[in-house]
Amino acid sequence: MDDNAPTPRRQPETLDPRAELSEFLRTRRARLQPHDVGLPSFGRHRRVPGLRREELAQLAGVSVAYYTRLEQGNGRNVSGEVLDSIARALRLSDAEHAHLTHLARPTAHKKKKATRPQHLRPAVQHLMDAMDGVPAYALGRRSEILGWNRLAAALFGDWGLLPPEERNWARLTFLSEDMRTLFDETWQQKASDMVSFLRMEAGCYPNDPLLSALVGELSVKSEEFRRLWAEHDVREKGHGVKRLRHPLVGELTLSFESMRLPDDYEQTLVTYHAEPGSPSAEGLQLLASWGVDAVDPERRRVP
């Protein structure tokens, strides 16, 4: 054993809410320039990217000292009105505003225990099974794949063949070459969307050791994940279009819809569909006839 070998960094058991708040505010401030918010820009050389703290404090109507404490991670007793003012000054989206509130006022948004097991209601699985011609799957709060239908298995691969701990969209996105090949030119957007999803969940569950472990694993194993995680971007992606390159049926252009389940907001139902009569619709039909019969229905859900 080499006594001079560096000691591996131990991953924290949970994420640090103060550090998360500090970095989120700093990165949001850095993306704005004075001319973006109607302020004069004095001098050609600025020591910091984006707005200075005093400029942001002026826009938000708070003292520089107060905003500095907040950006240093000290959000104790901050009011909703102040957070609203800062969110407006930073031009945050609704998703970013909600994320800021979760980070700055974690006790104001109490959640159920983060480590409790997640179970998909049988009725949701039955609904997905009844979606003829529509690939569908359900995700948990850490991007766990909780259930899926047979066409989703034919499109994305038989997740039932994986150990339960590996049935996770974030892990597959960043660590599976098959997923990178499947999403082809839209993989970068898929990766960015997945990190944004995990960022929002981390804001709601900063003390979740399983989520922290997932972030730690992906940070160690994927340079792309580390880069995207450091950007602190958050957004809700409810719908969009993905172009896939499937090994059996070739190129597919599919629209997706992501819907939070109304009785369990921590679970998301995701469906994909093709424009009727399009080559992609024909490809899905062909994939259904070729690939579905090989999928064991008993493998479709996490035990």
Image (cartoon, helix red, strand yellow):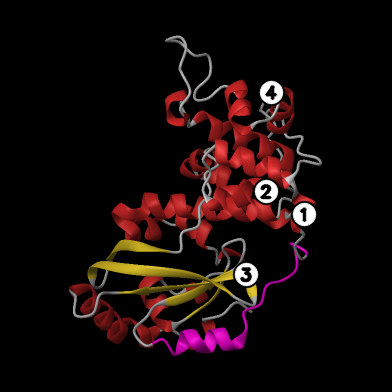
| Residue 148 drawn at (x, y percent) | 49, 78
Q: Quadrant of residue 115?
A: bottom right
| Mark 2 nearby-residue class (10 Å; few <14, some 14–19, many ≥20) | many
**Residue located beneath label 1 in the image:** 108
**Residue located beneath label 3 in the image:** 265
| Residue 16 drawn at (x, y percent) | 73, 42
Kindly identify the amino acid type of the residue bearing the numbered disc 4: Val
| Mark 1 nearby-residue class (10 Å; few <14, some 14–19, many ≥20) | few
Q: Considering the numbered disc 3 on the image, is that residue within a helix, a strand or a loop?
A: strand
Tag 1 and tag 2, C-beta contact below 8 Å: yes
Kindly identify the amino acid type of the residue bearing the numbered disc 3: Tyr
296 or 226: nearer the eye?
A: 226
**Residue located beneath label 2 in the image:** 101
Foreground: disc 3 or disc 4 = 4
| N-term-proximal mark, 1 vs 3 | 1
- Examine the structure image and report whether residue 68 is included in the region drawn in magenta: no
141 or 258: nearer the eye?
A: 258
At a point 73% along the width and 38% down the height, the residue shown is 18
User: Is 63 displayed left or right of 139 in the figure?
Assistant: right
Q: Considering the numbered disc 2 on the image, is that residue within a helix, a strand or a loop?
A: helix
Between the C-alphas of marks 3 and 2, the distance is 18 Å
Kindly identify the amino acid type of the residue bearing the numbered disc 2: Thr
**Residue located beneath label 4 in the image:** 64
Q: Which residues are magenta?
A: 113-131
Foreground: disc 2 or disc 4 = 4
| Residue 132 drawn at (x, y percent) | 37, 88
Vertical position of residue 148 compared to residue 28: above or below: below
Foreground: disc 1 or disc 3 = 1
